[in-house]
Image (spheres, helix red, strand yellow):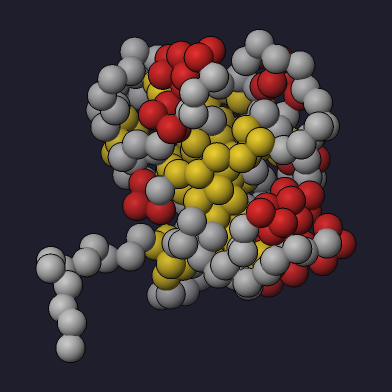
Amino acid sequence: MSEYVFSPSTPPSLPVAGSDARFPIHRIYCIGRNYAEHVREMGREPDRGAPMFFLKPADTIVENGTTIPIPPGTENFHFEIELVAAIGKEGRNIPTESALDLVFGYGVGNDLTRRDLQLAMRDKGWPWEIGKSFEHCAACTAIHPVAEIGHPLENDIWLDQNGTRRQSGNTREMIFNLQEQISYLSELYVLRPGDLLFTGTPAGVGPIAAGDTLVGGVDGVDELTNTFR
């Protein structure tokens, strides 16, 4: 019988609201440039050519209420509040009209970003990984089952920094709606139970400093609070 050369890490997970159960995380998919005004504030024009996805490692997840360290290597560390969809069923080549059947529940996430590194990579035509994927870069609330809250497809989304509103929008303003995102991803990957999908951020992203408290939410889902050091 084979043995691991060292003990494997505990699988990353998030709490399930109203339960003692945990939601085990398989992959974290994120879509970029999915709210028009955010695309413009990043110096681009919105389009419907094809959705743009990137991934974060599953073990970068950070729970609600956690204090998060400012990551190394950046002088422009940004917040991006997002609706997060949690996949509960396996699927491949899923049509948009049945895409929501794969969703177990929803949370509120923060796609934390080393913006200066992301933009430097973008300008060189290189992958974004060092700007988007690092320790503690994916904060998220507990997962709220669809059976409890429904599908928040036309809900206000917002973020306050130290009590001042910075981001404000509505999930209906997505360029590619959730059904389209799930369908498109399922053509490229086998979606599996445990996948998280960060669905994009509205305009107003900005820098985080040590000592800041961020409170963000999607109405009808939850509120995410994190402090930074």
For the C terminus, the quadrant is top left
Going 45% across and 62% down the picture, which residue do you hit? 25
Q: Position of residue 112 (x, y in %)?
A: 44, 32
Going 61% across and 64% down the picture, which residue do you hit? 190
Most distant residue in the bottom direction: 1
Which residue is nearer to you in this view: 13 or 66?
13
Q: Position of residue 122 (x, y in %)?
A: 53, 19
Q: Position of residue 223 (x, y in %)?
A: 53, 45
For the N terminus, the quadrant is bottom left
Q: Quadrant of residue 148?
A: bottom right
Q: Is residue 145 visible?
A: no
Position of 200 relative to 193 (above/below):
above
Is 143 left or right of 180, judged from the image as shown?
left
Most distant residue in the left direction: 5
Position of 220 relative to 94 (above/below):
above
Q: Quadrant of residue 81?
A: top right
Position of 196 relative to 177 (above/below):
below
Q: Position of residue 4 (x, y in %)?
A: 17, 72
Going 76% across and 36% down the picture, which residue do you hit? 50
Which residue is nearer to you in this view: 203 or 113?
113
